[in-house]
Amino acid sequence: MGTSDGLCISQGDLAAIRATPMFCALPPRALDAVLAQSELQVRARRSTLFEQDEPATAFYLVLEGWTKLFRMTVGGDEAVVGVFSRGDCLAEAPCLAGGNYPVSGETVTEARLLAVPARRIIELNRSSPEIGLAMLASASLHLKRLVDQIEELKARTGPQRLADFLVGLAPVAQGPCTIALPYEKLLIAGRLGMKPESLSRAFQRLRAVGVRINQNTVAVGDVARLTEFAGRERLMAFKCPAFRAGCGSR
Amino acid sequence: MGTSDGLCISQGDLAAIRATPMFCALPPRALDAVLAQSELQVRARRSTLFEQDEPATAFYLVLEGWTKLFRMTVGGDEAVVGVFSRGDCLAEAPCLAGGNYPVSGETVTEARLLAVPARRIIELNRSSPEIGLAMLASASLHLKRLVDQIEELKARTGPQRLADFLVGLAPVAQGPCTIALPYEKLLIAGRLGMKPESLSRAFQRLRAVGVRINQNTVAVGDVARLTEFAGRERLMAFKCPAFRAGCGSR
DNA sequence: CGGCCCGCTTGACCGAAGTCAAGCATCCGC
DNA sequence: GCGGATGCTTGACTTCGGTCAAGCGGGCCG
């Protein structure tokens, strides 16, 4: 886990930092104070950021690459709670609240991160109270994401969740496009709450709505069509026999 | 939705308020300031507190009764995101962050609530920054709960989730006991992420581990056995102690 | 009293997704 | 090149939980 000091932050990174929900509401002076306390870290793939139930001492802002939050279940599987990239903030709530990390965090690819020590921020909060509100805004966003995830798990099938995931990755809102999967299928499966085998089958199902997969690149015939599929009710295949016919052709 | 002023708060309620993760870290002066701005509400069953996507203008602390947070899915089902009782705080994060409610809120039984207007709190935050941190602590707790819920949905069967729910309600950690279900089975099913039919079947399954059900009272042969069946020791949340009907020492 | 409505339970059925196991490609070191 | 990792796909089977429909019991009202 290579580290360096907090001073050499590129212009691009600075812009990214300023754009986060966490820091965007902060007056420049307060932001400078935060950055002065922080550390720029470059980490290899599969590097541990923190572990569940450890006291929370620092939170992280992703500048480049991908990271995940997860839990080990009793059965030894990991339940992925979220996957994050540039501009996302991890674990700020437990840090500031002075508790333990509720999940474990790990890099998924090589990554560049801003690590912010909790203590300093708590101190800073005293002089600039808007930091607290900014963090709350960020935490609020995470709450919303988790609620989305719960709703998704409860109300959608695997292929629909996959469709939604792909739509989120697509560079356009309609028409054809190709997408490079940002990380391994194993993790995508985890993120979508299923096993790798089910992910495979979900991709097969999506061929019926114009999705082709080859290695880790995906070709989408029409993003709008995929979006529609993602939002449909679950019994759709049952109610609309045309799909089944389409599925069968291989 | 009956209301009255914020001044006549009973001693018991005051103690409950002081024990919440939200307010327990607050200096008495700040707490008084908050309470002076708040309103005590008594509401009938099935009364709407706020609706999803509305601007968040107030948050609620439950003093008595039960409330739920939920979302309407595309299919028209409701996905229950949480069910809350005495001592729990609802929607504080979006309020303070100045966003919209990410979910809808409703009372499940007749309930007594403390309604706290967002604006005043934001102003208060300027003079006492620890309010921001206290809210963050509360938000952090909600994050943890949601993560728990996701893990549960991903890693456990219906009967296991039900067992866990019952254990959480049991007044003892081991040995026999009887439990009165706090609200309708329909809602319990929603909370556990299943349909009423499945809940019924889950209860049947639990007969194998010594659980009998009759109307809305449940007889448990041995709570420890039930806990084991649920699949793990639930590490009791560090929710400032005191209330929560019968969640004794563990 | 008889009707009805409502919440809950049961049973039959079926689709979604997990498990287990085999098959196949790619990448790597030797 | 070969042998063996590793990661992805596929197929057969099983289990879980949702759907639909019927049945039942209690409470309420005329």
Image: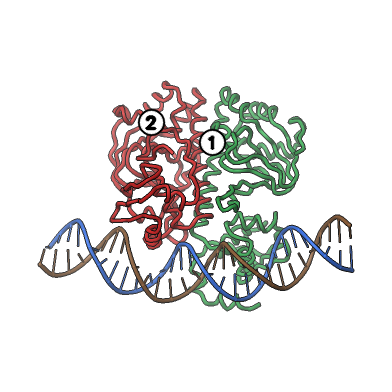
Chain colours: A green, B red, C brown, D blue
Q: Position of residue A186 (x, y in %)?
A: 66, 57
Q: Position of residue B197 (x, y in %)?
A: 38, 63
Image side of residue B211 versus residue A247, left or right = left
How far is mark 1 from mark 2, CA to CA?
A: 21 Å
Decide: few, some or many residues near mark 2? Use Cα within 10 Å; few <14, some 14-19, many ≥20: many
Say which of B164 and A15 sits in front.
Answer: B164
Chain of the residue on which disc 2 is drawn? B
User: What kind of residue is marked 1?
Assistant: Leu
Residue drawn at (31%, 41%) of the image: B111
Residue drawn at (51%, 26%) of the image: B130
Mark 1 highlights which residue? A136
Q: Secondary structure at mark 2?
A: helix
Image side of residue A158 versus residue B224, left or right = right
Q: Position of residue C16 (x, y in %)?
A: 53, 66
User: What kind of residue is marked 2?
Assistant: Ile
Q: Quadrant of residue A135?
A: top right
Q: Which mark is residue B17?
A: 2
Residue drawn at (67%, 40%) of the image: A49
Query: On screen, A96 above or below C1?
Result: above
Image side of residue C4 versus residue A36, left or right = left
Q: Quadrant of the C terminus of chain B?
A: top left
Q: Position of residue D25 (x, y in %)?
A: 22, 63
Say which of A160 and B176 sits in front.
Answer: B176
Q: Secondary structure at mark 1?
A: helix
Chain of the residue on which disc 1 is drawn? A
Image side of residue A46 versus residue D28, left or right = right
